[in-house]
Amino acid sequence: MEFKSLKNIETSFRQIRLFAIVFLVLCAVVVVWSVYSSFAFAEKQREKIYVLDKGKSLMLALSQDLSQNRPAEAREHVRRFHELFFTLSPEKSAIEHSVKRALLLADKSAYHYYQDFAEKGYYNRIIAGNINQTVRVDSVVCDFNSYPYSATTYARQMIIRSSNVTERSLITTCQLLNSSRSDDNPNGFTIEGFTIVENKDLQTVKR
């Protein structure tokens, strides 16, 4: 009889120990899940920006990872530079203003082209001949596998005279460096090593 009682006590002790172990494991799982959920929630909250609208209303804006948008910003930076640098009207002040804005997006390699064009009288001929020049960027191919990033631009120039319109091909290469953002450089890039690879007449159409 005493042996049976001891056996029952030992069985009960084993059951209690098993229940205790299971309880501790469940507690550990709950604690780990709670900590993980807390970190995940905090990370999501960091992606949110609360903006006051004149102190009256509260708007919620989701912030995006900047690295996800860099390729699009790089192509836009290069495209904008070409539009400013190669779109010219027959007014000296307009040319200077447009080129000045373009040079804020690049280093001295672009300024050297501007200086060379000016010395050869290119801008003076545009003004004297009442010529309008526009550029249409077809594509910008960027390589983000190495830094600084390389970019090749394929574009078309339209040189519009009173008597005819000349279409020219324009192919350029450059490298992109990360830089600080500003009102003059909203995409945060600087063009270096700007090179005109091809710029030749394709066709001339009489007006």
Image (cartoon, rainbow, N blue to C red):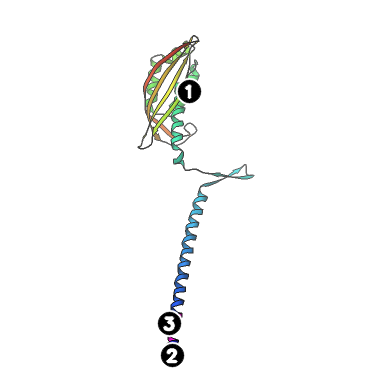
Pointer 2: what residue? 2
* Foreground tag (3 vs 1): 3
Q: Which residue is mark 3?
A: 10
> Of helix, strand and loop, which mostly describes the magenta segment?
helix
Which x, y percent locates residue 51?
57, 44
Q: Do residues under tags 1 and 2 come within 8 Å of each other at their CB atoms?
A: no
Residue at image coords 43%, 82%: 10
* Pointer 2 or 3: first along the chain: 2
- State the extent of the magenta-drawn residues as a range: 5-12
Q: Earlier in the sequence, mark 3 or mark 1?
A: 3
How far across and how far down the image is residue 109, in percent?
A: 37, 26
User: 10 Å neighbourhood of mark 2: few (<14), some, or many (≥20)?
Assistant: few
Q: Pick whichever of labels 1 and 2 is earlier in the sequence.
A: 2
Q: Quarter of the image holding residue 102? A: top left
10 to 145, vertically: above or below:
below
Q: Callout 1, which amino acid?
A: Ser
Label 1 and label 2: CA atoms lie apart by 104 Å
Residue picked out by circle 1 = 98
